[in-house]
Amino acid sequence: MTDAKAIAQQLGGVKPDDEWLQAEIARLKNKNIVLLQQVITLHDWLDGKRKARQSCRVVGESRTGKTVACDAYRHRHKQPKELGRPPFVPVVYIQPPQKCGSKELFKEIIEHLNFRATKGTVSDLRGRTIEVIKGCGVEMLIIDEADRLKPETFAEVRDIYDKLGIAVVLVGTDRLEAVIKRDEQVYNRFRACHRFGKLSGKDFQDIVQTWEDKVLKLPLPSNLISKDMLRILTSATEGYIGRLDEILRESAIRSLSRGLKKINKAVLQEVTKEYK
């Protein structure tokens, strides 16, 4: 008998969770949509750029929620497809692959618009991209993780803006800033910038309360905005909403698994220590 089997035999089989606990864990693992003021502010800003057909960039650190916010803006503009007519797609949202060249960029755009990317040269794909963008009535192209584009690919993005007169939005971290500033012609076309920041102060406290009320929804209140609990969360998350979401969901699941009806200070400290 191997050591691993011997250990497993001594510990015995893992007892399945009760059905109610399985259901609660499944609920807590589902991604809830919570409307945040910073998302509303970004969408209003993007709307202005789309109407003016002005290119811009959205910059923020990782785990601040900018990807979800930008993709949500795209979903708000989804139009029903009419039989026999090309789709009307006002907002296109793509995430290019690592080290994305011109061909990869054009294929991402074409396939997002539910067309088949033709084989051929870069010139062939460029022409096909312009054709489908015009045919689908695209008003805004959002390129997330834009720092993945190869330096020479930014010239293609610049040309899409110049030739088609649509708003192009580059989304990324401060790495994106460093990349586009290497090319003055690209940088000058994307001067307008919205910074999607971390949460702090009253905004952070309000988000914690919102998560407790609308996401966790445990049997008893955890009082997460009390002085001690809020201090723990502030230190562990540093204002990143993605990290806050992970910590609170895991704390809730761990609490319920131990027969608790709320998150207590000990559980919260235990979970947050793993994020340092």
Image (cartoon, rainbow, N blue to C red):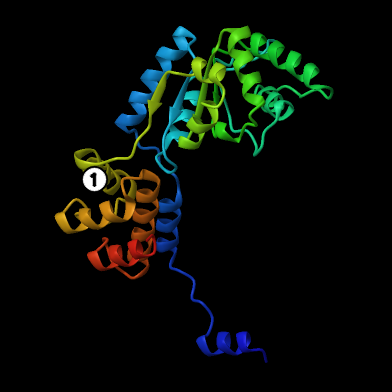
34 or 190, nearer to the observer: 190
Residue 267, by quadrant, is bottom left
In the displayed structure image, the side of residue 209 where residue 252 appears, left or right: right
Residue at 39% across / 64% down in the picture? 274
- Residue 70 in percent (x, y) is at 47, 29
- Residue 33 in percent (x, y) is at 40, 38
Residue 8 in view here:
yes
35 or 164, nearer to the observer: 164
Residue 39, by quadrant, is top left
Count the marks: how many? 1
- Residue 211 in percent (x, y) is at 30, 46
Callout 1 crowding tier (Cα within 10 Å): few <14, some 14–19, many ≥20: some
- Residue 162 in percent (x, y) is at 59, 9
**SS at circle 1:** helix
259 or 103, nearer to the observer: 103
- Residue at mark 1: 209
Please state, as top left, top right, bottom left or bottom right, where the N terminus lies in the image: bottom right
The answer to whether residue 109 is above or below residue 5 is above
